[in-house]
Image (cartoon, helix red, strand yellow):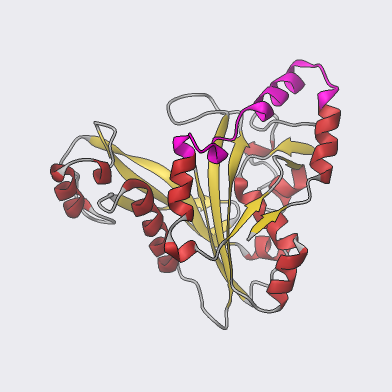
Amino acid sequence: MIIEADLTSEKKLLSELAKKDDPESKRIKRFLDMPDLSRDSESPIHALIQRILNIPEFKDFDLVKSPEVVPYDVSFDVYGFPADHPARRPSDTYFVDDKNVLRTHTTVMWYYYLRDPEIKKRLEAGETLGFFSHGKVYRKDEIDRSHMNVFHQIDGGFVIPRGKKEIQLEDLKNVLILIAKACFGDDVKYKFEVDHFPYTDPSLQMDVWVSASGASPGEAGASSREAASRARSEGGGAPSESGRWVEVLGCGIMTDLLMNNLGLDPKKWSNWAFGFG
């Protein structure tokens, strides 16, 4: 099912933005006008996302379309960002006005998805829910080979009544391994590292091995597949070919604070979440 957030507020903000002529507003308008490559069938980003959405285990997941201009408090307060977190500053985030920003993460989709009337009914009925959202995000990053001020993410989420299942980190790892294999091939080398994010605890990051040729093991030849079998997953030993580990996503279990802010009782609902991009 496709769930589209109410975009009335965003349309009003964009109408006001269109009237502004200062340099920052011009920059923001230019960024917003950039194509969403996650929805461009000719783009490799679109192809990568389709690989994820087409995984059989996700066939019943909802697809969420959320605003690109969001309230400051939704972007940061709801998700438990500390008061001194750098992302809250104009040096790191694009402010449309003093109360609204360009979204810095597609994780904002949780807020809009769980407020949808149809989704509320399904929650009241105790249904298990899985959902994805993808699109552009905006950050004032220094541009280099792994950072851009306008880039693309896909977020995934899952909530289930605790009476049906207690989600463990191993459950989330298994989901992410499916995604890594769908994106990079069955022979992909991966590992998980403990990490920290404002809205998940515990938190992990997933890294994949990229050879010096730029190919993942699933795209390379037999020698890479042999190396993959020797260095697969966690604790697999030192890779035998030149290359590097690249972080591809962050993930974890949503905090009780965030669950409460989203209207979910953490004593009744178990969950996992990830952000890729």
Q: Position of residue 19 (x, y in %)?
A: 86, 22
Q: Quadrant of residue 67?
A: top right
Residue at the spot x=72%, y=55% of the render? 112
Q: Residue furthest front?
A: 41
**Magenta stretch containing residue 43, yes or no?**
yes
10 left or right of 52? right
Q: Position of residue 39 (x, y in %)?
A: 56, 40
Q: Position of residue 130 (x, y in %)?
A: 57, 64
- State the residue in front, 102 or 66: 66
Task: Report the magenta stretch's main SS.
Answer: helix
Q: Is residue 98 visible?
A: no
Q: Residue furthest bottom?
A: 163
- State the residue in front, 116 or 243: 116
Q: Is residue 211 above or below residue 231?
A: above
Q: Which stretch is magenta?
A: 18-45
Q: Is residue 7 visible?
A: yes
Residue at the spot x=36%, y=58% of the render? 177
Residue at the spot x=38%, y=58% of the render? 178
Q: Position of residue 12 (x, y in %)?
A: 85, 37
Residue at the spot x=55%, y=51% of the render? 155
In the picture, the quarter occupied by the N terminus is: bottom right
